[in-house]
Amino acid sequence: MKNIEQHYDIVIVGTGIGGATVLSALVDTGASILVLERGEQLPDTAAARDAQAVFVDQSFKSDEQWRDVNGKLFAPGNYYYLGGNSKFYGAVMLRYRERDFSALKFEGGVSPAWPFSYTEFAPFYRAAETLYQVRGTVGEDSSDPGGERGYIEGPVPDEPCIARLRQKLLDKGYHPFSLPLAVDIERWLARSQTPWDGFPDTGTGKIDAQAAALTPALEHDNVTLISGAKVSRLQVSECGKRIKSVEFEKAGQQLSVSATLVILSAGAINSAALLLASKCARFPKGLSNSSDQVGRNFMNHNCSALLAINPFRRNRAVYQKTIAVNDYYFGDEPSGEPLGNIQLLGKLNGSILKAGLPAKFRWLPTFVLNWLANHSVDWYVMSEDLPNPESRVSLDDDGCIRLSWQRSNMSAHNKLLSRAKKMARATGYPFLLSKPFDSSVPSHQCGTVRMGIDPALAPLDSYCRSYDQRNLFVVDASFLPNSAAVNPALTIAAQALRVAEHIKTTETF
Ligand SMILES: Cc1cc2nc3c(=O)[nH]c(=O)nc-3n(C[C@H](O)[C@H](O)[C@H](O)COP(=O)(O)OP(=O)(O)OC[C@H]3O[C@@H](n4cnc5c(N)ncnc54)[C@H](O)[C@@H]3O)c2cc1C
């Protein structure tokens, strides 16, 4: 193990939404900051806008494999690049609803309360919206949490067929609203006429963690980035209460660097895995884990794709993803449980459909799938997944990640899916096909190193600081105590800004 000579004030592991955003808010402290990122710059090639290359050939996936609950190896849809998973995200930047910050009862259990209120958090949401150049509007969303927005412009416009769909929904008594989106749509389409959801961003209009936060931060002299640096372990100090050094592998070399503060932002699955991998004689369950909650409470949303097909109506949308419906977010019966969010997917085509088909249907000719996609409106139906200690990330003896996802709250999801189908039929789409997303797509992974007020139940305090090792912060989707039923990125970014503010007021560099 070779020591990098220099000591850094702060070492940040990972450049996803959590890592890049906290970095962007800490650069002006003047602290010396080292960023260690396992991935490299996403290559700007024609493949980045080719659905066959992205979805069928999976050219941008790593060759990493994890095990599922039964020990079966699978290739996870988890991405390692500068900017992390946000390079591929759908750029939906929704806030949690105000009631998502309180305990909520579901048929399948309870969604726990946050350690602070929406009111306290709202200013950070606003700052995150501005940082990620979100476009959106207020007043349309039936469960809107209120508060001033940081939107930089009005919403991304509906394409003509989506504008007609919006009108149809309104006519039928639904409340469609414009999705808040971190996309410069003109720039995105100028490169090539594709949707952005699931397509990698090569710096052409998606405002991801790299574009919004990492690249501007790297202009500061006090920030050093080492890419291709896979962190393998955190070393604890003799007293056990601090992280002493961060060990990583770069180009076959084992290196180590010491730091005053360590911010772990490797993503909900990898951050938990790293803390578990850092076990030692003194901490045999891993670091920051006196609660035994590290890796537990893994959540991922219950999501289904719903294809609403009308053989006589052509969908000519290129990107499609501009509206959503929250009419069922808190349920539609007085005593009913919350059900979730329904939003449009990025427009599917035959290649994307093929990639999602079970192996036994992959023989279907692409022209048939293209016909289906040309006559469908494609919805994403999303319900809350509840925390459960047995739903977890663990490490097998050979170091392989095991993802034992225990789905929860499926009754709510099935009800929401049936409401979504009814809505699709009402808007003129009589044929409906749906398919749930499984654990090989952990795109909304969260909860594995959660924050809370009781150190016996949560590894992190409400500023994402480890109760056990006080110079360690975990700032990525791990900290989320619940998954709510909205896409997570804006909430991760807002909390990263809140944590940075806390660090600035409590630490001196
Ligand atoms: C296809 C897709 C679509 C999505 N759409 C949306 C959407 O529309 N809206 C939304 O809110 N969310 C969306 N998400 C989810 C969103 O992208 C994630 O919630 C968010 O990016 C998570 O950020 P993070 O910082 O927690 O982790 P990550 O983005 O996973 O970042 C972790 C970083 O750490 C690096 N890393 C990992 N391990 C190590 C290690 N050992 N050493 C060094 N570096 C390491 C990784 O390479 C990565 O850069 C989508 C995700 C996907 C995959």
Image: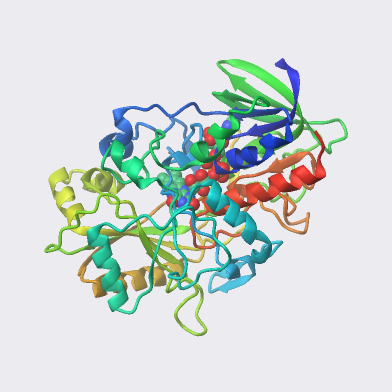
User: Which residue is found at the position 39% from the left and 37% from the top?
Assistant: 200
> Nearest the camera: 371 or 361?
371
Q: Is residue 30 above or below residue 330?
A: above
Residue at far front of view:
153
Asked where in the image residue 100 lies, by quadrant, the reply is bottom right
Q: Where's residue 217, x and y in %?
A: 60, 33
Q: Please identify the residue farthest to the bottom as the structure is shown.
A: 334
Give the image location of residue 88, x and y in percent: 42, 41
Which quarter of the image is occupied by the N terminus?
top right
Q: Nearer the viewer, residue 314 or 187?
A: 187
Residue toward you, 394 or 379: 379
Residue 471 in the figure: left or right of residue 385: right
Above or below: residue 5 compared with residue 304: above
Looking at the image, residue 271 sits to the left or right of residue 90; the answer is: right
432 left or right, relative to 498: left
**Residue in the image at 49% along x and 58% along y:** 94
Quadrant including the C terminus:
top right
Residue 54 placed where, x, y %? 32, 37
Q: Is residue 61 above or below residue 97?
A: above
Q: Position of residue 138 (x, y in %)?
A: 47, 66
